[in-house]
């Protein structure tokens, strides 16, 4: 930094600051490009470290004297200095251009990184320190043109955090949404509906429990009812066959309570995010087991069976293979093995058999058995990005129709420019994509080309 400060002073003296600034910008632009084109695992951390290095240089080496109005006359202190603005702008340009080297991926990586930070919580950090970490990630978000990509991934991860209780703090979640809505993207306001749903679900369960006798098994049931429009989840493709007593509890809630309260609505059950609390009677001592609903349904099978094969469990639960193998691994191959697998090994195969592990011991009376989560695969990320591309087509269509409805007639190039301007808050579309959407709108008879000038388009009412 000392060497940079000396170099800066020399360039200022000969009036060539712009040359030094251009080199500064090019260096960090190339560095950012390399980072975003590399592996996603360390992308955000590397970007944060790079930005911190650049800001240190600006605040340490590239300093100019403050404007005369800000100088307080003094004979004992040197005149105050401030960062040179052209280097601040150069840094912003370097990151913005560098992010374009790999479209969509930086925005996706930032959303996933924030998910990790918000799940982990602040630990020993103060509120101010924790907020500084969150704000530093958001300072990178502003360089991305793909605001819709970030919003989509952030919404999905927020929904999972809220439903499985993995969010470190509702207060920080709401604060983040407010910051995102006020400073970056107004559409983040829609996420507030998730919190409203969760509050309504608590009120409904309180009302449902109050109507039941004190010793009724329905007191142990908690249902979270969500509006389809407020949550970024599709209707579940796979399900599980519940034991009769559990299914009876859900049917009772649906028919005798929910349908009476909302007769025009229909509940679709999603058990993949459900949880259960069971009592395991082991030889050493009984334990309270906190498990996923999938894990709980499998464990209940061993109330009536000393031994079960993998295929028998699959037939009894109707779980698909991927979910069932992960579930059996978590129960028989992890750190807390409440089931025994024969033969031993880290993988679950079709011919494996399972037994209840009566010799299981643990110093704690309440035990949480982690389920093995399906990682967000390359295919899943690709599917999410495919959905985003589909949404972008509709956004462009709506923008073009809205513009043409107001203008009635417009030249092609002007239409392109106005469309880009209309959607730039959400994403920066490729010109080729806009051309394709205009062709589709012509085919669908929303627009027509002028017979006199094929470069002129007219709106068809």
Image (cartoon, rainbow, N blue to C red):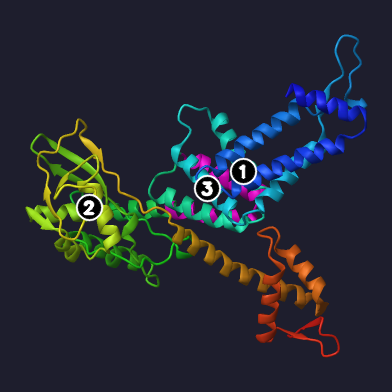
Indicate left or right for 404 with 271 as reference.
right
Q: Taken as a whole, is the magenta stretch helix, strand or loop? A: helix
Give yes or no for residue 437 being in the magenta stretch: no
Give the residue drawn at x 78%, y 86%: 449
| Helix, strand or loop at mark 2 | helix
Is residue 368 in view? yes
Q: Residues within 10 Å of mark 1 (few under 14, many from 20)?
A: some
Whether residues under marks 1 and 3 lie with C-beta atoms below 8 angstroms apart, the answer is no
Indicate left or right for 238 with 316 as reference.
right
Give the residue drawn at x 69%, y 81%: 439
Q: Position of residue 390 (x, y in %)?
A: 57, 70
Indicate left or right for 46 with 249 as reference.
right
- Real-space Cα separation, disc 1 to disc 3, in angstroms: 20 Å
* Front-most of residues 225 and 314: 314
Give the residue drawn at x 43%, y 49%: 162
Q: Where is residue 22 in the image (x, y as percent from the top left)?
A: 81, 41
To which residue does mark 2 refer? Answer: 328
Is tag 1's residue or tag 3's residue first in the polypeptide sequence? 3
Location of the N terminus by quadrant is top right
Is tag 3's residue or tag 2's residue first in the polypeptide sequence? 3
Give yes or no for residue 196 being in the magenta stretch: yes
Which stretch is magenta? Answer: 169-198
To which residue does mark 3 refer? Answer: 39
To which residue does mark 1 refer? Answer: 138
Q: Position of residue 429 (x, y in %)?
A: 68, 64
Q: In this view, does 235 lie above or below 213?
A: below
Q: Residue 428 carries which label?
A: none
């Amino acid at each position: 930094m000392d060497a940079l400060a000396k170099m800066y002073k020399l360039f200022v003296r000969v009036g060539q600051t712009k040359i030094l600034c251009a080199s500064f910008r090019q260096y960090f632009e190339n560095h950012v490009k390399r980072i975003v084109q590399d592996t996603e695992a360390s992308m955000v951390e590397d970007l944060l470290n790079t930005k911190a290095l650049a800001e240190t240089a600006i605040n340490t080496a590239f300093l100019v004297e403050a404007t005369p109005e800000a100088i307080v006359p003094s004979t004992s202190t040197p005149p105050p200095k401030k960062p040179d603005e052209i280097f601040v702008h150069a840094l912003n340009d370097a990151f913005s251009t560098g992010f374009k080297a790999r479209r969509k991926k930086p925005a996706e990586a930032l959303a996933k990184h924030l998910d990790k930070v918000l799940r982990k919580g602040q630990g020993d950090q103060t509120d101010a320190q924790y907020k500084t970490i969150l704000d530093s990630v958001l300072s990178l978000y502003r360089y991305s043109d793909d605001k819709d990509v970030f919003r989509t991934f952030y919404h999905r991860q927020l929904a999972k955090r809220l439903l499985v209780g993995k969010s470190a703090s509702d207060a920080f979640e709401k604060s983040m949404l407010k910051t995102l809505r006020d400073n970056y993207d107004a559409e983040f306001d829609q996420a507030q509906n998730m919190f409203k749903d969760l509050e309504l679900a608590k009120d409904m369960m309180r009302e449902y429990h109050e109507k039941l006798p004190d010793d009724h098994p329905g007191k142990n049931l908690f249902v979270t009812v969500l509006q389809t429009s407020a949550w970024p989840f599709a209707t579940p493709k796979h399900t599980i066959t519940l034991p009769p007593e559990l299914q009876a509890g859900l049917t009772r809630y649906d028919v005798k309570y929910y349908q009476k309260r909302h007769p025009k609505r229909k509940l679709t059950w999603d058990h993949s995010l459900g949880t259960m609390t069971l009592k395991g009677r082991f030889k050493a001592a009984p334990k309270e087991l906190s498990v996923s609903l999938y894990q709980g349904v499998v464990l209940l099978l061993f109330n009536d069976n000393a031994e079960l094969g993998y295929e028998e469990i699959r037939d009894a639960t109707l779980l698909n293979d991927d979910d069932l193998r992960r579930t059996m691994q978590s129960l028989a191959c992890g750190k807390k093995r409440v089931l025994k697998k024969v033969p031993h090994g880290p993988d679950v195969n079709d011919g494996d058999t399972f037994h209840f592990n009566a010799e299981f011991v643990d110093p704690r009376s309440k035990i949480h058995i982690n389920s093995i989560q399906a990682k967000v695969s390359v295919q899943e990320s690709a599917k999410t990005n495919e959905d985003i591309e589909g949404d972008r087509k509709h956004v462009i269509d709506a923008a073009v129709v809205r513009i043409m409805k107001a203008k009635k007639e417009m030249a092609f190039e002007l239409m392109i420019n106005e469309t880009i301007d209309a959607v730039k808050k959400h994403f920066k579309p490729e010109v080729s994509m806009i051309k394709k959407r205009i062709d589709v709108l012509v085919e669908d008879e929303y627009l027509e080309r002028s017979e006199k000038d094929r470069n002129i388009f007219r709106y068809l009412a």
